[in-house]
Amino acid sequence: MNKPALQQTPDGFYLNRTPWFAFILLCSIFALWAAAASMNDVLIAHFKKAFLLSDFQTAFVQSAFYLGYFFVAIPAAMVVRRFSYKSTILIGLLLYMFGCLLFFPAASTAKYGMFLLALFVIAAGLSFLETACNTYSTLMGPRETGTRRLNISQTFHPFGAMAGVYVGSFVMFKDTDATTEQLTQMSASEAAVQQLQMIQSTLLPYKWMIAVLVLMFILVAITRFPACKGNKPADSKPGSLRQSLGRLWRNPRFTFGVLAQFLYVGAQVGVWSFTIRLAMQMGGMNERSASWFLLTTFAAYFVGKMIANLLMRRLHPAKVLAIYGVLCIVLLAYTILVPNISAVYAAVGVSIFLGPCWPTIYGLTIDGLGEDTGVGGSLLVMSIVGGGVIPIFQGLLSDASGGNMQLAYSVPLLCFIVIVMYALKCMRQSATLPSGAAAAVAS
């Protein structure tokens, strides 16, 4: 039986069927940005020793990374609006590649600031990719199956995250690496040689990433992608960005949602960024052994995502968000209060309940925004900057308490209290919320 010709729906946004090769190619990009983000968690532990940094100073890895998202999200949305989703993706891949290339001058100069610049550029590329891909995946087929396509796309995320941690950990870390204590006891020249070797070991994962990105860029460039931009009268003019921002600012549900997303991303990044450090402190292990806990974290994240998908068939997304948020609070409290290795397992267990948070907050926040949906989505991408802010407070708290990583986990606990408040507010409004709020249920 012949497939029907690929056509746009009358509104110009959706398609009569999914172009599967283009769609799977799009899905694979979700794994690419997850790999970059998860390697940051490895870099934090690696740079702490290579540059002899405090916990506060290591948190700037995430700050540099997530500031890239913050500053580039609106420009990326403007590129989508002016050109196409495909063009936005290609620009994102180029910036991603350029950021990886910057690791080489950073390693040759052995300057921490240069590495932070490289991470900022990588994140700028990822901001282009996320701004385009999240929406595009829902549009690439019939409207009634948009949720299913987004679910499929976002299940690639944990696979990329696990790959990033695995490659980063077992290439950068060696069992023969000197400990921080050993480095401080060496002569200046001996320590410098050891630290330079550690810095140089960061390059190989990014060499591999560049090769993958070049291949992906070529595949996207030669593949035909549908427009999915909507049909507009020839004489129509886009609304003012300032007007959209004004309407969104006066929408209390939207502003609370942006705050919740800011705190969620910060809490997620904070939990993951210090997992290796927590395992080293509580379990007395080296970086390489502790990395297994971070790898397990992403496996738990995937499992939690699948469970949430099943729950959302029966429960309102806001209710699932509230339940998962409360369970995160319980596990984080355990992590803070119990002074043994089981606290690390509790921190890993938190990731089971992180899975649905980003897309559920996203879906509930942009639902019903109409013509302001695009700008609202960009502001939610900007809220990812929380991942660069919240870990700084964790690092400061750890340093102020003599390096107590358990106490630092009280920061994400406070974040989840606010997230649960947002979920409860949405539950109270659920009778008036359209079913479209459930459109994104797995990130």
Image (cartoon, rainbow, N blue to C red):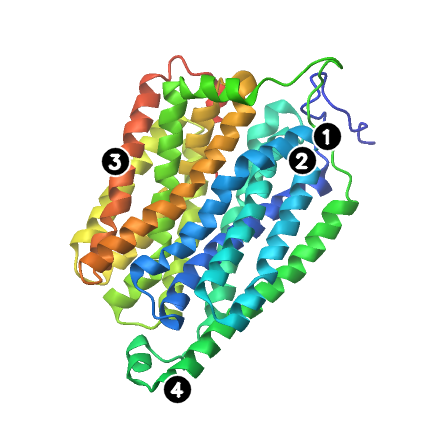
Q: Nearer the viewer, mark 3 or mark 2?
A: 2
Label 2 Cα neighbours within 10 Å, binned few <14 / some 14-19 / many ≥20? many
Q: Is residue 278 above or below residue 303?
A: below
Q: Quadrant of the N terminus?
A: top right
Name the element at disc 4: helix
Q: Which residue is mark 4?
A: 190
Name the element at disc 3: helix
Amino acid found under the numbered disc labelled 4: Glu
Q: Which residue is mark 3?
A: 417
Q: Would you say the residues marked 1 and 4 are in contact, meaning their CB atoms lie under 8 Å apart?
A: no
Q: Which residue is mark 1?
A: 227
For the residues labelled 3 and 2, the Cα–Cα distance comes to: 36 Å
Q: Would you say the residues marked 4 and 3 are in contact, meaning their CB atoms lie under 8 Å apart?
A: no
Q: Earlier in the sequence, mark 1 or mark 4?
A: 4
Q: Which residue is mark 2?
A: 85
Between residue 363 and residue 297, name the one nearer to us: 363
Number of numbered markers = 4
For the residues labelled 4 and 3, the Cα–Cα distance comes to: 48 Å
Q: Earlier in the sequence, mark 1 or mark 2?
A: 2
Between residue 308 and residue 373, name the one nearer to us: 373
